[in-house]
Image: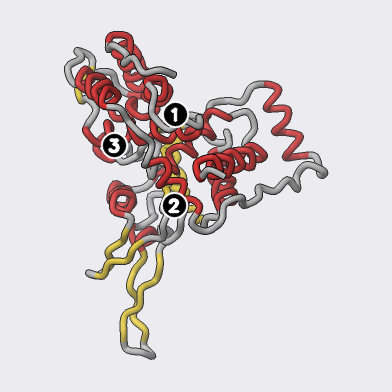
Amino acid sequence: MNDNNYYLKKSKAVLREVRKAVIGKDDIICKVYMAIIAGGHVLLDDIPGVGKTTMAHAFANALGLEYNRIQFTPDVMPSDITGFSMYNRQTGKFEFKQGAAMCNMLLADEINRTSPKTQSALLQIMEESRVTVDGNTYDLPEPFIVIATQNPIGSIGTQKLPESQMDRFMIRLSMGYPKMEDEISIMKNRLEPDKRDIQVECVLNEGDIKEIKDKVASIYVDDSIYEYVAKIVAKTRVRENIIQGVSPRGSIALIAMAKAEAFLRGNEYVLPSDIKNIVIETFAHRVVTNVAGAAGNEMAKKEIKDILRTVPVPQIGE
């Protein structure tokens, strides 16, 4: 069997398993998985109770990953994430005690409810995949994925992530409320005894994620696609309503996500449609507009949509 087909089937199986736990959010599930196999981190920006934690836990089970969750509050310290050194009186030496980040998948719940110092410690780990404690550096397990959540509505006791730190997340997603029929299914799954025992099964073997990530990285990108992305990015830097445009890190993230989308579609090369399907989720949180708050996010999405209409689409066959 062709390796690409084998790992594509494995990926489809992962998505099926996650859908057991997260109902009616197929597009969100796909995009979270795309970020994982593209080597990025995910910010889920949504109200409580819509399934953010459930989805993170389901992915950890389906991918066979070691999973930690940390509930951010103002008293969470950087050492809770990175770990710390403790003196052992028996040996007369300091020993490293692991923090929450020493895992494959870390759910950072309500990241905007902790101090900027703690936020910075986490975001540095996201960039480097290692922690440094008392001059000693410890590599995090491979893969290392952060799924962070924040509530865009409540502002009491929160510390907004600076724009430079938002840039560390490959994508930002909002799950939204379920449709009525999906909400009925969710209630039944949680409340009816014969449905509460549904388990998300592990479908990947050790090393599968690395192989899948390698397959994604090898997806071909034509020069015209690179030019297409560069033109979109350039326009984000000169728009009247945009104060800060997309950085080169954003350009790289978009190409990586487009490769993951092409892989999930069974293609060996990126199409312009792959760029269009993921550009809002990849770019909107990197753009700073002259409108504050939630309205600023909607303005960013509108500006990106307007830009897409003005940039010529490369002619690459489907």
Q: Which x, y percent locates residue 137?
A: 27, 66
Q: Which residue is mark 2?
A: 210
> Is residue 58 or residue 180 the one in the foreground?
58
Nearer the camera: disc 3 or disc 2: 2
Please say if 167 is above or below 177: below
Other residues around mark 3 within 10 Å, as few (<14) / some (14–19) / many (≥20)? many
Nearer the camera: disc 3 or disc 1: 3
> Is residue 305 or residue 184 the one in the foreground?
305
Q: Residue 167 bears which disc, if any?
A: 3
Disc 1 vs disc 2: Cβ atoms closer than 8 Å? no
Q: Which sits earlier in the primary sequence, circle 3 or circle 1?
A: 1
Q: Is residue 139 left or right of residue 109?
A: left
Which quadrant, please, contains the C terminus?
Answer: top left
Other residues around mark 1 within 10 Å, as few (<14) / some (14–19) / many (≥20)? few
Q: Which sits earlier in the primary sequence, circle 1 or circle 2?
A: 1
Q: Which residue is mark 1?
A: 153
Which residue is at 37% across, 84% downward? 88
Which residue is at 58% across, 37% downward? 51
- Give the SS element for disc 3: loop
Q: Report the residue that reaches farthest toward the left.
A: 238
> Is residue 107 or residue 109 the one in the foreground?
107
Q: Which x, y percent locates residue 144?
A: 41, 53
- Three-letter code, disc 1: Ile
Please say if 219 is above or below 82: above
